[in-house]
Amino acid sequence: MVDSGYQGSLAPLVFVRSVGFSASDALRLMQAAQRMSEVVRWRLAPPGVPADVYIAHANSVSRGKQPVAAKSRPDSSGSSSHNSTFDQTQLYLDDNGWHKTHPVCVLGQLSPNDDLMARSASLVFPEALQQLQAGLLRAQGELVALRMLYVLGRSAWEQRTRWKTHRLQISDNNRLVAAIEPMVWRAHLLGDCSVDELENASLQAIPHSSAFAAPGFDAIPLETALWEFAKRCPEALLTQMVPTAYLRAPLTHRRPTQLSSRALGDHCVAILRALDTHSRTADELQHSMRMQRPALLRALACLALIRAIHPEPKPRGMLGWLPMRWRNKVFGPSGLF
């Protein structure tokens, strides 16, 4: 097992939920998982974030379609709960061994005892850690779309000062594998590009003169790639991603997002709903929603980067006379968010 080291600390977070284990075994498994990859960083899915991968006890999985009665229960607000570690005790696997389009790592041995505590106790170490490593390695290879979107989003964000003037081209061994057009909010990915090619590629910024056109490339909304990057980047980057104005000025809606409520997650959905009534500052959102500061910064970074929110515009008569370079210091350069 090795510490995560893909391009320093920039490997994407991948969110895991455990099902059917005792609390102590679940903690031990997650502590081990955090040291099991150089390509991704396995982390327990925080409140409000759907899991990408499940780790489940063998007694907690079944084959076939999930019965209606076994679906996630609504919480007190009436919405479905996705963030509780044990909000479901049985996963229903399809023919590929996935639960609701997500990979599942199955650990332990089947037990004839139907008591949940007895079943949880059947996990044996260190064999369970070997099963975990093999299962997460398989899951890592199945998360190709997630990893590719993350690389595209990271590449775009790192070149954000060139969004208004340049196209970003990504090549591996002189083979063009992706292009990003921030001016039209779109990315392009070569159809037969592998995730390893994209992760090891180099980037070149080219002055934007015409729309990108090349055979064999699939168009991707840049919003989707930026979302994956903001959702999964290292926590240390969040303070760079959220402009100071977003933490001081009242926030309001900027444009509708194309992402579903489930993709957005509980925190971002709650923020957008709160802004439906009136503008609020970051501190007001944190207090009213009882969020931890890191969780708030993550949600604001996601929503800011996809241009779903922005600081409430000041009346033009108050700041309209200021030179643009001074207005940018207050609100941040227009077009970056």
Image (cartoon, helix red, strand yellow):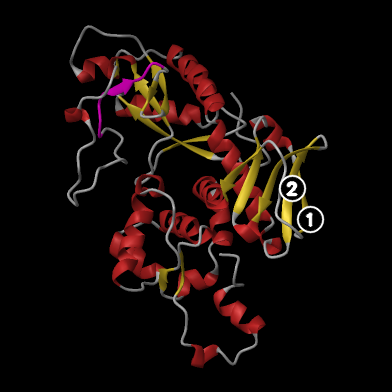
In the foreground, 35 or 44: 44
Q: Residue at x 50, y 92 (%)?
A: 318
- Give the structural element (helix, strand or loop) at label 1: strand
Q: Residue at x 65, y 52 (%)?
A: 156
Q: Which mark is residue 206?
A: 1
In the foreground, 17 or 2: 17
- Give the structural element (helix, strand or loop) at label 2: strand
In the image, residue 186 lies at what x, y percent? 60, 52
In this image, 305 relative to 292: left or right?
A: right
Amino acid found under the numbered disc labelled 1: Ile
Q: Which residues are magenta?
A: 87-95
In this image, 234 relative to 50: left or right?
A: right
Amino acid found under the numbered disc labelled 2: Gln
In the image, residue 167 lies at what x, y percent? 72, 55
In this image, 7 relative to 315: left or right?
A: right
Q: Give the residue at mark 2.
A: 169
Q: Which mark is residue 178?
A: none
The C terminus lies in quadrant: bottom right
Are there few (<14), some (14-19), or many (20+) residues within 10 Å of tag 1?
few
Q: Earlier in the sequence, mark 2 or mark 1?
A: 2
In the foreground, 34 or 189: 189
Residue 332, magenta (yes or no):
no
Cβ–Cβ under 8 Å for marks 2 and 1: yes
